[in-house]
Image (cartoon, rainbow, N blue to C red):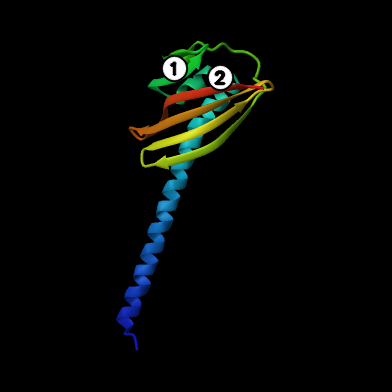
C-alpha cells in the first residue's frame, strides 16, 4: 500500500513537469512566431517593394553571399536592398520551406517563386539584444 505522502509527491512532480513542458512549448511557439515575423518582413517587404520593411529584417552588419556570372560576391544586405525602388507589387509566391531553431540561432530555407525563376534563400538568424534579425543570406537562382 502506498502512503498518502508518496501519492501527493508523485502528483506534485507530475503536475510540475507538465507545467514546465507547457511553459517551454509556449516559449518555443513565441520564438517561432518572432522568427517567422522577421522572415515575413523580408519576403513581403520585397514582394510589395517596401524597402523599409525589407531592410528592417536584417541586422546592420548582415551579409549577402551569392555567385553571379561565375564570380563570388559578398555585400552588406542593408546596403544592397537599401537601393530598392518603389514600384508595382511583384508577382511571386513566398514560402518558408524549413525553419530550425537552436537557442539564439535559427536557420531558414525560403522559396521566392516567379513565373520564370525561383530564388532559394538560405537565411541565418540570430537573437541579438532580444531581437531576431537575419545576419546572413546566401541564395541560389534557378531559372525555368
Query: Could you tell me residue 95's position as x and y percent?
Result: 59, 33
Q: Depth check: give the residue in front, 55 or 93.
A: 93
Q: Is residue 79 left or right of residue 144?
A: left
Residue 51, percent from left and from top: 52, 17
Bin the neighbour count of mark 1 within 10 Å (Cα to Cα): few under 14, some 14-19, many 20 and up.
many
Residue lying at 40% horizontally and 60% vertically, measured from the top left: 19
Element type where label 1 sits in the image: helix
Q: Percent x, y for residue 83?
A: 50, 10
Q: Are there few (<14), some (14-19), or many (20+) residues within 10 Å of tag 2?
A: some
Compared to 69, does 33 lie above or below? below
Distance (Cα) linking label 2 and label 1 = 13 Å
Q: Circle 1 is placed at which residue position? A: 78
For the point 66% across and 16% down, the residue is 88
Circle 2 SS class: loop
Mark 2 and mark 1 in contact? Answer it, CB < 8 Å: no
At a point 51% along the width and 13% down the height, the residue shown is 68
Q: Disc 2 designates what residue?
A: 50
Instruction: Give the quarter of the figure containing the N terminus.
Output: bottom left
Q: Is residue 92 among the parts visible in the rendering?
A: yes
Disc number at residue 69? Answer: none
- Marks 2 and 1, the one that precedes in the sequence: 2
Measured from the top left, where is residue 114 in percent x and y?
65, 23
Amino acid at each position: 500500500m502506498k502512503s498518502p505522502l508518496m501519492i501527493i509527491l508523485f502528483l506534485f512532480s507530475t503536475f510540475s513537469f507538465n507545467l514546465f513542458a507547457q511553459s517551454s512549448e509556449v516559449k518555443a511557439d513565441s520564438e517561432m512566431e518572432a522568427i517567422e515575423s522577421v522572415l515575413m518582413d523580408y519576403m513581403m517587404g520585397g514582394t510589395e517593394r517596401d524597402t523599409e520593411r525589407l531592410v528592417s529584417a536584417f541586422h546592420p552588419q548582415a551579409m549577402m553571399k551569392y555567385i553571379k556570372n561565375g564570380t563570388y560576391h559578398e555585400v552588406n544586405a542593408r546596403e544592397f536592398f537599401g537601393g530598392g525602388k518603389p514600384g508595382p507589387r511583384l508577382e511571386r509566391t513566398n514560402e518558408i520551406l524549413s525553419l530550425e531553431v537552436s537557442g539564439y540561432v535559427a536557420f531558414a530555407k525560403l522559396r521566392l517563386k516567379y513565373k520564370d525563376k525561383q530564388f532559394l534563400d538560405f537565411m541565418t538568424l540570430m537573437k541579438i539584444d532580444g531581437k531576431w534579425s537575419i545576419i546572413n543570406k546566401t541564395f541560389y537562382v534557378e531559372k525555368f
